[in-house]
Each structure stands twice: as C-alpha cells, then as structure tokens.
Amino acid sequence: MARTQKNKATEYHLGQLKAKIAKLRTQLLEPPKGSSGAGEGFEVTKYGHGRVALIGFPSVGKSTLLTMLTGTQSEAAAYEFTTLTCIPGIIHYNGTKIQLLDLPGIIEGASEGKGRGRQVIAVSKSSDIVLMVLDASKSEGHRQILTKELEAVGLRLNKKPPQIYFKKKKTGGISFNSTVQLTHVDEKLCYQILHEYKIHNAELLFREDATVDDLIDVIEGNRKYMKCIYVYNKIDVVGIDDVDRLARQPNSIVISCNLKLNLDRLLAKMWEAMGLVRVYTKPQGQQPDFGDPVVLSSDRGGCSVEDFCNQIHRSLVKEVKYVLVWGASARHSPQHCGLSHVLHDEDVVQIVKKKEKESEGRGRFKSHTTGPDRIADRVKKAPLKN
Ligand SMILES: Nc1nc2c(ncn2[C@@H]2O[C@H](COP(=O)(O)OP(=O)(O)OP(=O)(O)O)[C@@H](O)[C@H]2O)c(=O)[nH]1
C-alpha cells in the first residue's frame, strides 16, 4: 500500500488491500477457541459497577496511579516492566464501586502480538472506558503510537459507530443506497470490498459520508467503540506552558501522582465518561434509601425503568403497575411513568405493583404495595402511555 500512489485510478485497488489486511488481522487476533484471549494472570473477574483499564507505555506511572486511587498496592519502580500481569483495584466514588485495572506497559507492535500486548488489549476491550496514561515529559508521539496499536485491533477511541446500515442476505444481490452525497466511496468500490469478504447478497445504506475504513469496520462488525481519557502524568517535571497546552487538548487531563495533583478532577472526569446512573429506591411512605443506589449504565443494559426493575429482580417487571419518579428525568415531581421511561442520575423511584397478593414476601419492595393507593386509583382511570 505504501508503494501504491494514491489517486482516483488506484483507489479501488487500495480499498481492496485495506479489506484484505483487515480480514487477516481479524484472523491473527482471534483468541484460541474456548478462551477469552486474556491469558494467564489476566483473567480478572468483573467486579463493581464499571471497569476502567489503565493503558500506557512502561514506566509512565500506571501502578502509582492505581495505588493512589484505590489503595491497592501494585508494584511501582523506576525501571520498566514492573507490572507483568493484570492488577485490579477498587475505586469507591459517588456511592459506586469502579474496578480499575493496572496492566503491563504496551510497546509498539503490540497489535502484532509483540510483548504482552495481545493480552493487554483483550482485557482493555472488556472494560467500559480506557485511561491512556502518558508521560507529560515524553514525546507527544506516544499517544499516536498507542492509538494506532489500539485501532489496529479494533478499538475505536472516542468515536461513534459509522452511520452505515449493513445486513447480509441470502439472495437478491447487493442493494446500495445512500441518504447523503458520498465523497470517499462509490458503488463500485463497495461492491469490490464486499466481494473481498465473499458477500454477494446484502443491503447497504450510507447515512453519512463514510470512508472505506468505516465500511470495513461495519462489515467486520467486531469493533469496540470506547471512551478514552488521555491522562498526562508527571506534570511536576515539565514547565507550565507544556502543562497548559496538554490540559487544553480534548478528552485530556494533567495530573501528578507524586504531588497528588488533580486526582480528584481525574475521578470526576472518569465518572462523567462512564455515564453511570444512580437510582435510589423509595418504599411507599418512607424516605428514599440514599445509601444503596441501583446503578445503571446506557452502555451496559440501558437506563430505562424496565432495566432498573430487571436489575432488582427479573420477575419484578411483570408485577409493575407504574412507577413514581422524582428527579432530573421527571417533568414534575413525582411523575407517573411506564417501563420505557429513561432515568437520570440520582433519580428516586417508587414502584407500585399490580396486585397486593402477588408481591407478598418478595424482598426489597414488600412495603410498596401495602394499603390502598390514591394515586393508583387515579392512574386506573386515566392510564398513562409512557
Ligand atoms: N516525577 C514523577 N514521577 C512519577 C510520578 N508518578 C510516578 N512516577 C515515577 O515513575 C516511575 C514508574 O512508575 P510505575 O508506577 O512503576 O509505572 P508503570 O507505568 O506502572 O510501569 P510498568 O509497570 O513498567 O508498566 C516510578 O519511579 C514512579 O515513582 C509523578 O507524578 N511524577
């Protein structure tokens, strides 16, 4: 590809080569059957309400950061490759528990299986967000190298999935459509790429001016879109101008583990990126239970009332008549809502069940249904749609 000139005449050839490389890379990175690809020392059980992976070159201060944030001791030293496996720690923040994973430093070529890159990447894929730890005193190039390594194995950082609808079919050939003008690909190129994947019957609809790489991502279908925060550590050893410049970059934060600078801001940023939603339960006639929230996430299962019920108990959703919601998602407090209502962080929810008898002796919401309910009567007369 490097030797091929980039122009209109060669773009089909280049597109095909890209698809070939993507296909081979997927084969190369496929874990052996029956394994998660994580490997020995890397298979850490998921714990808490979310998982965050620390990725970075050796000796940028990942272990020191883990120790600072979680109190878990991960060996930190002035020489490289002190961490050789995956070390988990727990951050207690805003009433939730977040699992933080310290991973060995990745080196260039990790995506080709060099060093422990393959295992590190497998674990990173299993997390909700990535903290890319960088050394503020080292070259800016590190960030690009790491991003490239992660891109090569199908991780897309701070990007949205391409707006391309793609569905394989059994017959009917390829139907090609677009709702916008396409400047990077045309019908012929798409056909060639699909043929490269031996796909001869499919529906393809472009809803944005996507590139060849976007199309390959959609066909491969195994890409993981994740949020990433770029954490510049060791700002105690660089000048104020550099700190200012780094801090102004998007999705970036500057910290110093040694001087304990900005760690609270890092936690706040991480929390925001995870998009966790805490919902407090309120038994009827009692104060909400602010000590033990039900934690939902739009990435993991969704934030609707139905998801909330499912998290408490699988059978609860069948018994719900309606719920009362107080908080940011409610237009008025309390709002009567149905199962599809989307909850916001720190909402308070009271569940009203269908029948008294049904819920007797079933744990957390026992008290919700006792006694006649004036609101329930009102809802019976005018059922709400949402
Ligand atoms: N100046 C300065 N040094 C730091 C800071 N944070 C960590 N270090 C030093 O950086 C060195 C490497 O730290 P580690 O935490 O072992 O780095 P690591 O990224 O876990 O390294 P590997 O385990 O090799 O991947 C240690 O000597 C730390 O004392 C900081 O904020 N400022």
Image (cartoon, grey):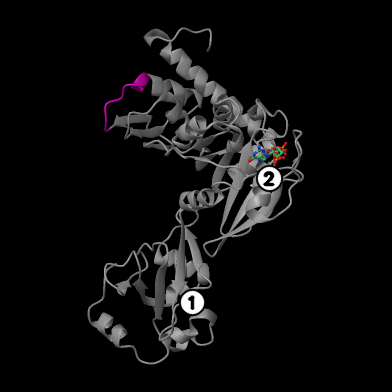
Q: Residue at x 44, y 36 (%)?
A: 248
Q: Let me know if residue 46 appears in the view.
A: no
Q: Is residue 141 magenta?
A: no
- Quarter, ligand 1: top right
Secondary element under disc 1, as helix, strand or loop, is loop
Q: Nearer the viewer, residue 314 or 83?
A: 83
Question: For the magenta stretch, what is the residue range?
Answer: 179-188
Residue 182 position by quadrant: top left
Residue found farthest to the front: 240
Q: Residue at x 64, y 46 (%)?
A: 65
Q: Residue at x 42, y 38 (%)?
A: 161
Ligand 1 is within 8 Å of the C-beta of the residue at disc 2: yes
Asked if residue 186 is positioned above or below residue 90 in the image, the reply reads: above
Asked if residue 308 is positioned above or below residue 367 in the image, the reply reads: above
Secondary element under disc 2, as helix, strand or loop, is helix
Asked if residue 305 is positioned above or below residue 193 in the image, the reply reads: below
Q: Let me know if residue 24 appears in the view.
A: yes
In terms of sequence position, does the residue under pointer 1 or pointer 2 come before the other? 2
Identify the residue under disc 2: 64
* Mark 2 Cα-neighbour bin, 10 Å: few <14, some 14–19, many ≥20: many
Please provide percent x and percent y for residue 130.
56, 43
Please provide percent x and percent y for residue 296.
48, 61
Q: Nearer the viewer, residue 180 or 297?
A: 297
Residue found farthest to the left: 382
Asked if residue 262 is positioned above or below residue 347 in the image, the reply reads: above
Please provide percent x and percent y for residue 10.
43, 10
Identify the residue under disc 1: 289
